Image (cartoon, helix red, strand yellow):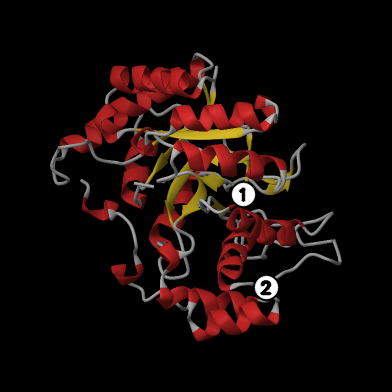
Amino acid sequence: MASCGAATSAGAAAWGPAVSLRVGLSSGHEMPMLGLGTYQLLPEDLARVVPHALGACGYRLLDTAAVYKNEAAVGEAIRASGVPREEVFVTTKLHPKDHGEERAYEAALAALGRLGLDYIDLLLVHWPGVAKRSPADKGNAAARRSTWSGLQRLVEDGKARSIGVSNYTAAHLDDLCEWEGCTIRPAVNQIEVSPLCQQREIQAGCRRWGVHIQAYASLAQGSDALLLNPAVASIAAKHALSPSQLCLLWALQQGFSVIPRSRSTLRVTSNALPHRLVRGGSGLALSAKADGAREATAPDAVALADDELDAISALDPGDDSGRQCWNPNTVA
């Protein structure tokens, strides 16, 4: 697994104090729109790519999780980078076995210990179901609410600045946000989003509750159906981008934040280019279709035209055949 109160529109992207484009979350905090994913990265990988990403490339977000079993190495790599802690936005995610108020609370404290940090910038519930429980078990809904109570306590105690979910469907979000015990709505839903898997129903649910979407698997796990697609190749060539860079630009321009991962420092550098193009030096090139978007003011900003965005978006087959990762629709 790589995802209350009244509904509001998601925060508009804005400049942060470091080098990265940031989005305002419902929590009142800002989150970089470009991050480095760390799924399947080993300690030796992290020791190499994290300092490079933070130092040479301007990344300011690192995404990890308990199930990745690399939180300690992520923390060590941050310290080795020399970048001040307060400049690095750290996301981690609770293991699906750690549902329930007390268990979630204690698991988050354990994650802080592994990371060597005093607080987590963004703590996510990794999966809407409980590990080793049938996805059809209706007790999953009660577990999600109980878990959320634990996360809200972590915010109150200063251990987490923002809290959110991952792989939650629109129905999961509605159930949580309509629950009377939900006093802090999810700031983020981290879900699979690529041109082949856009999950429009979940997008609508996130807009309904003012939840920002952070996309994982934005390159469809390197699928040839995406990266070798003639439309993608043509538009990428027009803008002097690689197909991977184009897909990241497509996501960023629509207001999704992205967390591409790689063991290669060259690929980490390459993945940062779309973010720099969207930033454009002094303004934003977010599409008018993105919630809260502002028009670009910088002449060097690169913006895909609406017909180009539409051509890429048309690659979604409209069913689950474009999905590369886990399907939360089976979880009650």
**Residue 220 in the image: x percent, y percent?**
43, 65
Identify the residue position indicated by label 1 in the image: 34
* Relative to 54, residue 101 above or below: above
Label 2 to label 1: alpha-carbon separation: 18 Å
**Residue 101 in the image: x percent, y percent?**
31, 21
Residue projecting furthest to the top: 157
The residue depicted at 60 percent of the width and 53 percent of the height is 268
Q: Quadrant of residue 199?
A: bottom left
Give SS at disc 1.
loop
* Relative to 293, residue 196 above or below: below
Q: Amino acid at mark 2?
A: Leu
Q: Nearer the viewer, mark 2 or mark 1?
A: 1
Give SS at disc 2.
loop
Q: 160 or 218: which is nearer to us?
A: 218
The dot on residue 304 is 2
The dot on residue 132 is none
The residue depicted at 79 percent of the width and 62 percent of the height is 296
Q: Is residue 277 left or right of residue 39?
A: right
